[in-house]
Structure formats: C-alpha cells, structure tokens
Image (cartoon, rainbow, N blue to C red):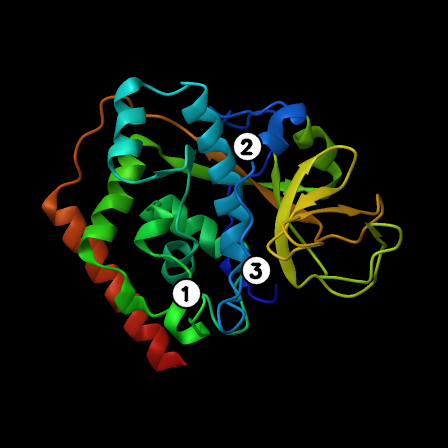
C-alpha cells in the first residue's frame, strides 16, 4: 500500500451525503448470490494483482445483478452478450486488462491506480485476456498482450457504462455496507481461529471485497478451503482506514468512440508502458 498516497489526488471523490448513486445496488441478503466464481491470483507465480481483482470482483457482481435482472437497456444487455462479456450466464471481466493498464509491479500496486484505469480505459471480457496456469508474473503482465481491438472495446464499454469511484472512510464502512460492497485492504492473513481471522497489527498488504454486515464478511482471491473464497474477519480486524466504492452509470444511446480517441488512448498506453519499463 506504499504507493497509495502518491497516486491519490485532491480531486478524488469522497463518500458523503452528496455521493452519486450506483445503478447496481444489490441488497445485502442477495450479494453472495452474484459474486463471481473465485479465482486464485496465481499461475506459475503469484500475479500480485489483488488491487485490480478487488474492484473487478465487485463490478462482476454488480453487472451480473444488472444483467440477470434486466436492469439495463435491452440494447446494452445485447451488447454485453454479443461482445463476449457473458460466460455461463454471468458477466466476466479481465483482471489482467486492468492490472496491465494500471502498471502493476512485482510488488503490487496502489488501490486507486486500478480504479483510475477502469475509469479511463474500461473493461473487456475475461476470456479475451485470461490468466493461464503456465503464466509467470512477466507473462501475465506483458503489455504486448493488449491489442488495439481490446483498447477499442474497453473504451466502448465506458461509452455505455461509465464507471467512477469514491473513497470511503472507515468510520462510514457500516453505512456503506447497507447499500454497497467496499473495495478494502488489510493484512493477509493470520491463522484463523474457529473459522474467523483475528485482529493482527501487521500492516495492510492485500486488497479484497467487503461484502455485507456483520462486519467483516469478505470475498478474497485466496481460498479458505477448496472453492471457498469468502472469509469472516474479526469485527475489530485492523483494516486500512479507508476503502473505495464503485459507481456504475448507463448511457442508453452511446456514441461510438472516434478513431482519433482510439489512437490517442493506444499511444498513451504504449507511452506509459515504455516509460514504466525505463524507470524500472
């Protein structure tokens, strides 16, 4: 989490009375039903992209809720299906697309960089840019995996579904849980006691999803038992003192991104990748 303060800006939204509502507000008692199929963040090596997987997991749950309950326009629902976002009846997004766009390092990333990448570059289907079992960190995060057609699809996703985020202070976590899930961070993981993870004073080093009350039931990218990605943290578990809320909007008659905007975004992606490589 050492990069977090560096990546934050004074203009970042903060949760409060004037916060923008999200079109996907899943009732607490139904959130678990829409969580994505869990995936361990590891191929041949750990992918170190928990900061990307946290928001992607939230957005997969929210979009699946919107899609299954026909809470978006028929046109946009068809667009998601036709462009490969629907897999086995649920919405899937590529974690790698976000992790690469946000310049995840072998040491991880800030929480906010992936959120900003989603906000600016959108989302593509998981099957377009997956995690394969043979992949080492460098294979998974190789920027050459991202094609111009992926860039174009990510931008088109934003033209239909703009995505924003706001920062949630820890004092407001319970209030936010009443209407939403939270992208949050803490230490991973002390040994559980009777199925619950006890408080530890170790520094936060991992991002996960706060699902619902009682605090804190979370969705993770490491299994508790085979196939079980939900963990129960102690009510006093030491978390990073803020998290983030994801906010989806919908444009029902979007304009197709222009060729120039696609070229500009591709150039920006390549420039950032080259510069990041030089600085490393």
Relative to residue 202, is residue 180 depicted above or below? above
Quadrant location, the N terminus: bottom right
Q: Position of residue 276 (x, y in %)?
A: 36, 73
What's the distance in space between the residues labelled 1 and 3, CA to CA? 13 Å
Q: Secondary structure at mark 3?
A: helix
Please name the residue that numbered disc 3 is placed on: 4
Q: Is residue 116 left or right of residue 233?
A: left
Question: For residue 97, which quarter of the picture?
Answer: bottom left
The residue sitting at 17% across, 47% down in the picture is 261
Please name the residue that numbered disc 1 is placed on: 103
The residue sitting at 32% across, 74% down in the picture is 275
Q: How dense is the environment of label 2, judged by Cα within 10 Å: few (below 14), some, or many (20 and up)?
A: many
Sequence-earlier tag: 1 or 2: 2
Which of discs 2 and 3 lies nearer the camera? The answer is 2
Q: Residue furthest right?
A: 194
What's the distance in space between the residues labelled 2 and 3, CA to CA? 29 Å
- In the image, 121 versus 73, the foreground residue is 73
Which of discs 1 and 3 lies nearer the camera? The answer is 1
Relative to residue 230, is residue 78 depicted above or below? above
Q: Position of residue 20 (x, y in %)?
A: 50, 27
The residue sitting at 57% across, 25% down in the picture is 26
Relative to residue 266, is residue 156 depicted above or below? above
What is the total number of numbered labels drawn onto the structure image?
3
**Which of the numbered marks, if any, corresponds to residue 34?**
2
**Which of the numbered marks, if any, corresponds to residue 227?**
none
Q: Is residue 43 left or right of residue 142?
A: right
What's the distance in space between the residues labelled 1 and 2, CA to CA? 29 Å
Sequence-earlier tag: 1 or 3: 3
Q: Secondary structure at mark 1?
A: loop
């Amino acid at each position: 989490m050492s990069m977090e303060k560096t990546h934050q800006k004074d203009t970042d939204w903060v949760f409060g009375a004037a916060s923008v509502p999200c079109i996907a507000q899943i009732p607490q008692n139904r959130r678990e039903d829409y969580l994505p199929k869990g995936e361990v963040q590891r191929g041949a090596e750990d992918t170190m992209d928990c900061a990307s997987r946290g928001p992607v997991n939230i957005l997969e749950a929210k979009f699946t809720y919107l899609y299954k309950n026909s809470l978006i326009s028929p046109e946009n629902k068809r667009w998601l299906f036709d462009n490969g976002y629907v897999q086995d009846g649920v919405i899937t997004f590529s974690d790698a697309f976000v992790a690469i766009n946000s310049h995840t390092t072998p040491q991880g990333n800030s929480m906010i960089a992936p959120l900003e990448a989603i906000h600016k570059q959108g989302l593509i289907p998981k099957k377009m840019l997956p995690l394969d079992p043979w992949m080492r960190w460098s294979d998974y995060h190789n920027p050459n995996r991202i094609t111009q057609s992926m860039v174009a699809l990510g931008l088109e996703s934003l033209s239909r579904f703009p995505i924003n985020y706001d920062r949630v202070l820890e004092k407001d976590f319970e209030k936010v849980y009443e209407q939403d899930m939270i992208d949050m961070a803490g230490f991973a993981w002390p040994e559980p006691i009777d199925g619950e993870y006890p408080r530890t004073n170790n520094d936060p080093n991992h991002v996960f999803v706060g699902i619902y009350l009682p605090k804190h039931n979370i969705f993770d990218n490491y299994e508790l038992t085979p196939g079980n990605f939900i963990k129960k943290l102690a009510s006093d578990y030491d978390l990073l003192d803020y998290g983030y809320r994801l906010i989806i909007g919908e444009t029902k008659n979007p304009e197709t991104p222009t060729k120039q905007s696609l070229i500009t975004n591709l150039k920006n992606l390549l420039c950032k990748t080259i510069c990041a490589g030089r600085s490393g």
